Image: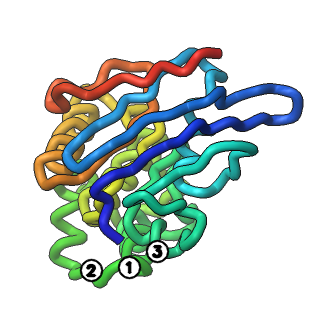
Amino acid sequence: MSVNHLEAENLQLWRGDRHVLKGVAFGLGRGECLQVTGANGAGKTTLLRTLCGLMVPEEGRVLCEGRDVRADLPAFHSSLMYLGHEAPLKADLTARENLYYWIGVRRRIAMAGLDAALARVGAAAWCERLVRTLSAGQKRRVALAGLALMFAPLWLLDEPTTNLDAEGQQVVGALMAEQLARGGAIVVATHQQLPAAVHAARILELAP
């Protein structure tokens, strides 16, 4: 599925008696980045999980190409890459093995491409170590290598620079800039300033 236009239409979502998403609406086209901001607990992660179909709003819809994504979630999921707070890594596999299986279920991946992605994010030196031995920042770099390998039209990123040093944050900026340059779209939830390489992101601020 292509993602020429993504739209959130009056999203309303409660968690228990707490009204988290209060009529959230936006449109996003090719080559555009939307930065979702707000205080802790404002609903940034909830919005991302709702956009990708992991949470169901009480009211409103998420539309892709004008069609409700819930009409065919597998097709919609094939067009996106969701990177949450915790990368989907298996503790008892190496960083390299994790990437091979994680990305390999979505697309055919050559070992040369996998190794190049690990090198690009600064993970080549320790890619044969078990993930359970890695620091939080190293695990985040493995997840970033996954972004580099998955050419999905839509990226949904939740605090992508968490636990990264300045060099790692520059890697995030470069990956995001490339995604936008090739016509991809990004929704990124963060209360931090985006890397300098990402220009002219629109802002959606969620009220607590």
- The crowding category of the residue bearing disc 3, from other C-alpha atoms within 10 Å (few below 14, some 14 to 19, many at least 20), is few
Which residue is rendered at x = 78% and y = 35% of the image? 14
* Amino acid at pointer 1: Gly
* Amino acid at pointer 3: Ala
Q: Is residue 79 above or below residue 17?
A: below
Query: As drawn, is 159 to the left or to the right of 23?
Result: left
Residue 162's quadrant in the figure?
top left
Q: Secondary structure at mark 1?
A: helix
Provide the residue designation for mark 2. Answer: 109
- Residue 159 visible in this rendered orientation of the protein: no
* Amino acid at pointer 2: Ile
Which residue is rendered at x = 59% and y = 36% of the image? 10
Provide the residue designation for mark 3. Answer: 75
- The crowding category of the residue bearing disc 2, from other C-alpha atoms within 10 Å (few below 14, some 14 to 19, many at least 20), is some
Among numbered discs 3 and 1, the one appearing first in the sequence: 3
Q: Secondary structure at mark 2?
A: loop
Using the image as rendered, state which of residue 151 and residue 127 is in the foreground: 151
Using the image as rendered, state which of residue 82 and residue 172 is in the foreground: 82
Among numbered discs 2 and 3, the one appearing first in the sequence: 3
Using the image as rendered, state which of residue 204 and residue 195 is in the foreground: 204
Provide the residue designation for mark 1. Answer: 104
Q: Is residue 28 above or below residue 100?
A: above
Query: As drawn, is 163 to the left or to the right of 32?
Result: right
